[in-house]
Image: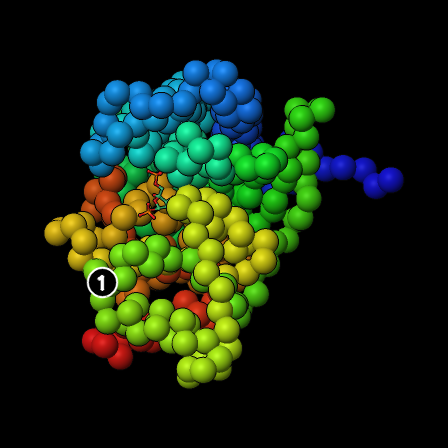
Amino acid sequence: MTAQTTLAQYLESHATPELASIMTTLATASVAISHLLDKGALAGIHGEAGGQNVQGEAQKKLDVISNDLLLNALIHNPNCAGVASEELDEISPANDDGTLLVTFDPLDGSSNIDINMTVGTIFSILPYHNQGQKACESDFLQKGENQLGAGYFIYGTSTMLAVTFGAGVAMFSFDPMTQTYILINDNVRISEQTAEYAINASNRRYWLPPIQQYIEELVQGDTGIRQKDYNTRWVAAMIADVHRILIRGGVFMYPYDTKIAGKAGKLRLMYEANPMSFVIEQAGGASTDGVERIMDIAPTAIHQRIPVVLGAKEEVDYVKALHETAG
Ligand code: AFP
């Protein structure tokens, strides 16, 4: 039997001590979240928490608990200079001498909790350059290109971790017996082509013409110009849809739509789009808002929303070309 590589062993050779320390803190919190999810209704985590998050969405109990677990763990890590969470209006400064900032979506796909479906934690690690000073929101407003690490913990039929530190993507599976993450793939790659796509088609009438055209071509299948049949998958949790793409290919879209005036897409640049784009690109895929590479976009606000098209490179490039043609 070959020796198994634990997350701790992997980090020794693939991350700086500071990144490894943050990753270990995130992994410890993820295990606590995973245990709560395992208990489900018995842990009293189902139902509304009563409040609303900064985007005006109802918070589930576990959103709040997961947020607090991650936040409390990170602000006590001396390497962490500050934390920004999708669930909190304001950023949380941590240790002035820390060298890293962390953003996270504590529980992506939270509407899935009550129906016992997949959810996950998405994280992004950025450099902090103002040591000796208290971190503030502007310190976080860095392009995705600056990320030093990013990934997600997915709480599905088993708990898994996908992570990149800028040199490929590694995937781990949580072993409940040893309570450790075990490496299962140290070089995850995404096929450049795909026959699967993920989009919430109920928004069709609100999409812009390039996405309308693209989806129409896919729906026509082998009778249309694409000359092949496509299949749709939609979990309503980006984390699950992106995980599927990492495992078996595909393209994920939450494009610009006109459903709500002034809302440029649904997903958040700092908590969802940037970290997932880093993972996808590091696995050989691509990511765009339709016009620009997502990780080239300079953020203007911590809770900024953005259209997202990511996954198989050829498809993402094609969608981008349709936007360019449309002008
Ligand atoms: P929640 O975490 O608030 O449930 O939202 C999940 C999400 O941001 C993303 O993970 C999904 O891809 C997307 O929303 C699903 O949105 P629709 O409900 O509009 O399909």
Does residue 154 appear in this view?
A: yes
Q: Is residue 219 left or right of residue 188?
A: left
Identify which residue is drawn at 40% across, 46% down: 236
> Residue 107: percent from the left, percent from the top?
41, 33
Q: Which residue is depicted at the point 31% across and 47% down?
A: 267
Ligand 1 lies in quarter: top left
Residue placed at 35% from the left, 41% from the top? 271
Nearer to the camera, 207 or 104:
207
Residue annotated with mark 1: 205
Q: Splitting the image into 4 quarters, where does residue 319 fall?
A: bottom left
Q: Is residue 192 above or below residue 258?
A: below
Instruction: List x then y, in percent, for residue 86.
Output: 31, 34
**Horizontal placement of 39 versus 50: left or right?**
right
Residue 260 vs 159, above or below: the answer is below
Q: In the rendered view, would you say 169 is above or below 79? A: below
Label 1 SS? helix
What amino acid is at disc 1? Arg
Label 1 C-beta lies within 8 Å of the nearest ligand 1 atom: no
Q: Front-most of 155 and 73?
A: 155
Residue farthest toward the top in the current orientation of the protein? 43
Query: Where's the C terminus, which quadrant?
Result: bottom left
Furthest residue to the right? 1
> x, y (%) of residue 155?
53, 34
Instruction: State the residue at coordinates (87%, 40%).
Output: 1
Residue 79 as seen in the image, left or right of residue 184: left
Q: How dense is the environment of label 1, judged by Cα within 10 Å: few (below 14), some, or many (20 and up)?
A: few
Q: Position of residue 129 (x, y in %)?
A: 34, 37
Is residue 168 at least partly visible in the picture? Answer: no
